[in-house]
Image (spheres, rainbow, N blue to C red):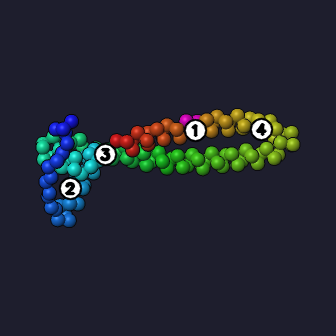
Amino acid sequence: MEEDVRRKWVVVRFNEKEFEQLKRFQKSSTERSRSNYIRKMVLHQPITLRYRNDSADQFVEEMIGLKRELNAIGNNFNQAVHKLHTLDRIPEFRQWINHYQTAHQQFMGKVDQILERSNQIYRLWLQE
């Protein structure tokens, strides 16, 4: 529409300190462009601010650490089971290997569930 086209300019100058403050304020909002942020401020339109929950940030950091640890444990478990497969010619180990193969599959299934859920939570948190 013709009335939606913005043709008027307003030039505002800032010193470095003021400009840095403006950038911080804009980054704490959901406005992606500085011009939209300033326009809303000047026209007294609502500006949506982002809110960061420190305890949730800490939770996400802990989950990322746990994810790394679970990956390392899973890798070690995979290597151990692989080594045991080289011993399957010894009769006593066959039964043990079969038992731990099942445990390994259950463990890796749970690790995959935990990793997927933590990835979902992390992706959701990044969007906010």
Q: Quick one: label 2, few (<14), some, or many (20+) residues within 10 Å? A: some
- Disc assigned to residue 96: 4
Q: Please state the horizontal and vertical placement of residue 94, each as a whole percent of the image.
A: 82, 38
Estimate the spatial distance between the alpha carbons at disc 4 and disc 2, rounded to whole Å.
66 Å
Residue 127 in magenta? no
Q: Earlier in the sequence, mark 4 or mark 2?
A: 2
In whole angstroms, how far apart are the C-alphas of marks 3 and 1? 28 Å
Q: Residues within 10 Å of mark 4 (few under 14, many from 20)?
A: few
The location of residue 43, given as percent across then percent down, is: 12, 43
**Dot 3 or dot 1, earlier in sequence:** 3
Judging depth in this view, the residue of 106 and 37 nearest the camera is 37
In front here: 45 or 1? 1
Q: Which residue is mark 2?
A: 22
Q: Amino acid at mark 4?
A: Trp
Q: Which mark is residue 79?
A: none
Q: Specify the segment rendered in magenta.
A: 110-114
Q: CA distance from mark 3 to mark 4?
A: 50 Å
**Cα distance in 3D space between marks 2 and 1:** 43 Å
Q: Secondary structure at mark 3?
A: loop
Give, as a three-letter code, the residue at label 1: Asp
Residue identifier under label 3: 52
